[in-house]
Amino acid sequence: MNGNSFLHSYLNVILLTALCLITLSGCQAASDNLINQSKQEDSLSNEDTRSSSADSSNEEKGKTFTAEIIKVIDGDTVKIKMTNGNEETVRLLLIDTPETVHPSKPVQPFGPEASKFAKELMPSGSKVEVETGIGERDKYGRLLAYFYVDGKMVNKLLLEKGLARVAYVYAPNTKYLDELENIQKQAQQDEIGIWSIENYATSKGFDDSKSKEASAEKPTGSCNDPQIKGNINSKGNKIYHIPSGQYYEITKPEEMFCTEKDAQDAGFRKSQS
C-alpha cells in the first residue's frame, strides 16, 4: 500500500468515528429530552389531579333532602315530615333566636318576631330543602341543619333581619360560619332587631335583665290598669294588641294603653290578628 492510500484510509476511519460519535450524542440528547418531557407531563398530571381533588373537596355538599313543614316551634326550631313519613325536630345550625316557648324563661324581645318570620317563610304543609350538618344531631336528639326556601338559606335570613345571633359554634359544623358572621356584623351596624337593645344579645345568650327593661310597662292614659299592649316590631312598625288578639299573650309591650284611641294617638296601629 502506498502512502497516499494509507492516508486516505486513515482519514475515512476518523470521519466515520466522528459521525458515529455525533449520532450517538444526538440520540442520547433526544433520549434525555424524551425522559424530561415525560417527567414534566407526569408532574403536570399529578398537579392536575391534586387541583381536581381540591376543587372537588371545596365543592362537596352536605346531605340534602326535601321535607314537609309540620310546624315552626320557634325561630330556630322546626318540626318536619320526611319522605318516608317519619317526623323529626330540627335545630337550625349556627344561629340562636330569642325564646318564646322555653319552659323556664319568659318570652324574650324579638322572639315572637323571629317565630312569626319563620312561620311566614315556612308555613305548615310547605316544602323546605334541608342540608344536614356533619354531626347530624345535638344532645337532645334533634337534627342539625341549614334550611332553604326558594334557594335562600333561612339561617341567613334570620340573621339579616336581626332576629338571630350566631351561636352554638362547634366543629366540624362550621361550613358557613364566616358568611353568617359577616351577615351578623351588618345587622349589628344597622342596629336592627335584637341589636337595637343595648347589650341584649351577648356571646352567652340573651340578657333577661335587658328583656325586663325593654318590656317595662309604661302606661299611657288615665286608667290604673291599662290592658292594651303597644309593641314595635323588627321593621319598626308600631302595633297595638287588644286582649282578644291572637298574639296578645306572647307580646311583650314597649307601652301600655288604656284605650285604642290612646294607642292610635301614640302612632300605633291595630294588629291584624
Image: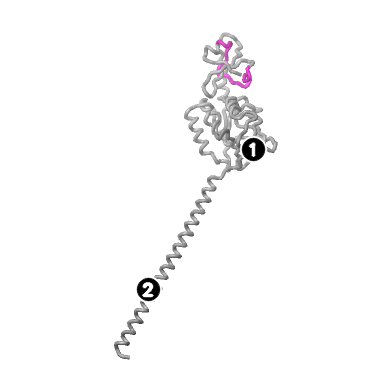
Q: Position of residue 26 (x, y in %)?
A: 39, 70
Q: Earlier in the sequence, mark 2 or mark 1?
A: 2
The colour scheme of the drawn protein is one colour
- The residue lying toward the viewer, choosing from 54 and 219, is 54
The range drawn in magenta is: 245-261
Residue at the image point whose x is 37% and y is 79% from the top: 17
Q: Are marks 2 and 1 in contact (CB under 8 Å)?
A: no
Element marked by disc 1: strand
Count of all numbered marks drawn on residues in the image: 2
Q: Quadrant of the N terminus?
A: bottom left
Q: Is residue 223 above or below residue 23?
A: above
Magenta span: predominant SS is loop
Query: Relative to residue 51, is residue 137 depicted above or below?
Result: above
Direction right: furthest residue: 85
Question: What's the residue type where badge 1 is placed?
Answer: Leu
Where does label 1 land, which residue? 143
Q: Is residue 20 magenta?
A: no
Which residue sits furthest top?
Answer: 222
Q: Give the alpha-carbon distance from disc 2 to disc 1, as whole Å.
A: 76 Å
Residue 163 drawn at (x, y percent):
55, 28
Q: Which mark is residue 97?
A: none
Please name whichever residue, 218 or 244, is drawn nearer the observer in this view of the structure.
244
Mark 2, Cα crowd under 10 Å, few <14 / some 14-19 / many 20+, is few
Q: Which numbered tag is attached to residue 22?
A: 2
Q: Position of residue 99 (x, y in %)?
A: 61, 28
Q: Secondary structure at mark 2?
A: helix
The x, y position of residue 56, in whole percent, is 54, 48
Q: Residue furthest left?
A: 4
Amino acid on which the number 2 mark rests in the picture: Ile
Which residue is at the front of the view, 157 or 52?
Answer: 52
